[in-house]
Image: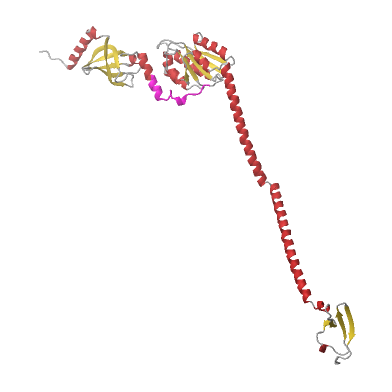
Amino acid sequence: MLILSVTQVNRYLALKFKEDTKLHGVMIRGEISNFTAHRSGHFYFTLKDKESAVKAVMFKSNASRLKFMPESGMNVIVMGTVQVFERDGVYQVYVTDIVPDGVGEVHVATEQIKKKLAAEGIFDESAKRPIPQLPSRIGVVTSRTGAALQDIINVLSRRYPIGELAIVPSLVQGEKAADSIAEALVKAGKLDCDVIILARGGGSLEDLSPFNTETVAYAIYNSSVPVISAVGHETDFTIADLAADIRVPTPSAAAEIVSLSKEQLEGHLRYCDEKLRAGLNSKFDFYSSELDKLTERLLRFSPKQKLENDSLICENLEKNLKTAYGKIISERENRLGSLVSKMEAMSPVKVLDRGYSLVYRDGNVITKSADLNEGDYIEIKMADGVRRAKILDDREKF
């Protein structure tokens, strides 16, 4: 019996696989599992169905041409050759191409890009910028020969002749279109545009592929001015639409958004006039009230007002003092009059009117006869005058 080495067996089987033309260029349907994208650029995965599984490898030269990134759980159809890997003695599929099963690879690639950009916040509503209502300069990024440009020009010339157009031509289809669009958006942003319209006509999903790229999405997101996406028709929806500040179905609709008709402009002016008047009235009322408060405060704390207040206080105090002084004088006069009346009533001089007289010697009142000596000179004061006399005999009795 012939005895073979392991290497000989594996090499024999590998030869048999190579000779079997049915295993060359084979197409296999299955589900991807255990997918690994190696840092070398090669893809390693298992292709399985409900009952079986087979290992697969896709080398970098083929993997780099894919428009999407395979994922575990994805149903696909792979194309390649079944061969034996002699070192391990296993057979596997050497894949040259992968196509999503049921949907096109362009659709799958687009959905993957959407998912990635959404995670980065490129589509967030908080990042959307308002579109200016009265732009001075409008940038247009589109094909110079396309119908989209003519549609925009026709609408703006009719509705908004005061707007200045800055046309930045770019490719809108083909492999180089994405880079061309991104460069045109940057250039338009440097032309002092107030808003940019990114436009092209409708087309198939493949025709619109440049607008479904990360390159264009990042260019829109990083644009220095708001971007309106007017790509395709009503039923078409691209990544550029999601990244833009606003999406419209047609280039004509974009031109209408950045322009105001005569009626709209008049209405806008009326609104601005009313708002301005209301604002001015509100400001006038506010500052008028503030002026009144400041004037009142100034009057309350000004030196002049303080002097006037102090002068008024002094006048009141003077008036009160005069009143109090007059009252005191009146009381004192009344009291003095009463005392004078009492004094006069008790005065010895009053007795003279009743027939009595007063005797003085040397200015002193003599009340006793014993106080007089013979020869003393006296004064006798009576009601009607004074008489002088001399004591002859102070002992003589009458």
Could you say which is closer to the camera, residue 282 or residue 319? 319
The magenta stretch spans residue 118: yes
> Does the rendering let one see residue 82?
yes
Image coords of residue 326 (percent x, y): 74, 61
Q: Point out the stretch of residues depicted in magenta.
A: 113-131
Tell me the quadrant of the picture where the N terminus can be found. Answer: top left
Q: Image point 64% across, 36% down: which residue? A: 288
> Does the rendering let one see residue 187?
no
Q: Image point 54% across, 12% down: which residue? A: 155
The way the protein has been coloured in the rendering is secondary structure
Could you say which is closer to the camera, residue 109 or residue 381? 381
The magenta stretch spans residue 156: no
**In the picture, residue 323 is in which quadrant?**
bottom right
Q: Image point 39% across, 20% down: which residue? A: 114
Image coords of residue 149 (percent x, y): 51, 11
- Describe residue 55's horizontal placement relative to residue 60 as left or right: left
Tell me the quadrant of the picture where the C terminus can be found. Answer: bottom right
- Describe residue 392's horizontal placement relative to residue 12 as left or right: right
Query: Residue furthest toward the front?
Result: 354
**In the picture, residue 320 is in which quadrant?**
bottom right
**Count of numbered labels shown in the rendering:** 0
**In the picture, residue 295 is in which quadrant?**
top right
- Describe residue 186's horizontal placement relative to residue 47 as left or right: right
Placement of 134 over or under 81, stated as above or below: below
Could you say which is closer to the camera, residue 52 or residue 351? 351
Image coords of residue 98 (percent x, y): 31, 14
Could you say which is closer to the camera, residue 333 or residue 83? 333
